[in-house]
Amino acid sequence: MSAQPPAVRIVVADDHPVVRTGFAELLDTQPDFEVVATASDGAEAVRVCRELSPDVVLMDVRMPVMDGIEATRRLAGSVTTGPRILILTTFDLDEYVYDALRAGASGFLLKDVTAERLFDAVRVIAAGEALLAPAVTRRLIGEFALLHPRPDVSSTAALGTLTPRETQVLRLIAEGLSNPEIASRLTVTEETVKTHVSRVLGKLGLRDRTQAVVTAYESGLVVPRSRGPR
């Protein structure tokens, strides 16, 4: 009989006590989760995460003392260390969320998310994957990249280290394609795509696909589509 994998250790950071307690209690219903601490602001979240080294942080964006963006930046500054950050937000088209993704968050969820969607998201993040919902995440990134173009010189320079094939893979990631879809588009194996994706992330110093999408837009490799009349 194989040993059970260790529980995913979670910190919940939100300045509203009811929301914070509600998410913590909900997550604790899962046998493979352990909520190790809660925090009422970003500074407290950074402190408890450095003390307890959780796997995943559910991070509200707008908090007193230190907001979730700065807390994310401090916790997700390393590619290999630090917890995965899952942003909680009320509105999906929120510039705060965009800035949190730029700071290193692996994805975001609306606060009215269903329990099952929340559980799935935490497991995906804990496994080291990005919570990249193409339609929502690309729309968010595209909207704010279009409104506030901010060419990132370091990102643009880093793109020069990619091979033509790796650049092509990055474009397809930014389009929201999954590994199987990229493999089909390029007529290669999924394993080959995984290798390319790993090399792209490594060369650009990125944690996951979400940061790859942000970098593709920030560097100008992918240009947001102009919005037509609404």
Image: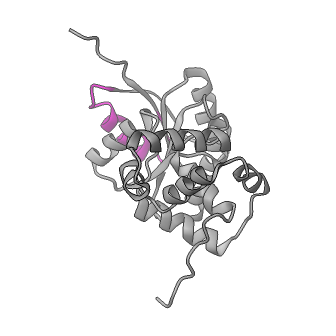
Q: Residue at x 73, y 52 (%)?
A: 160
Q: Quarter-wise, where is residue 222 in the image?
A: bottom right
Residue 107 place in picture, x, y as percent: 48, 49
- The vertical placement of 134 against 206, above or below, is below
Residue 123 place in picture, x, y as percent: 36, 36
User: Which quarter of the rendering shows the N terminus?
Assistant: top left
- Closer-to-camera residue (172/99): 172
Does the image show residue 110? no
- Closer-to-camera residue (208/40): 208
Q: How is the image coloured?
A: one colour
Q: Which residue, as the protein is rendered here, is positioned at the far left?
A: 1
Q: Which residue, as the protein is rendered here, is positioned at the far bottom?
A: 229
Q: Residue at x 47, y 34 (%)?
A: 56
Q: Residue at x 29, y 16 (%)?
A: 4
Q: Quarter-wise, where is residue 104 in the image?
A: top right
Residue 88 place in picture, x, y as percent: 47, 51
**25 relative position to 56: left or right:** left
Does the image show residue 167? yes
* Residue 30 included in the magenta stretch of the image: yes
Residue 208 place in picture, x, y as percent: 53, 43
Q: Residue at x 58, y 50 (%)?
A: 166
Magenta-colored span: 11-32
- Closer-to-camera residue (213/88): 213
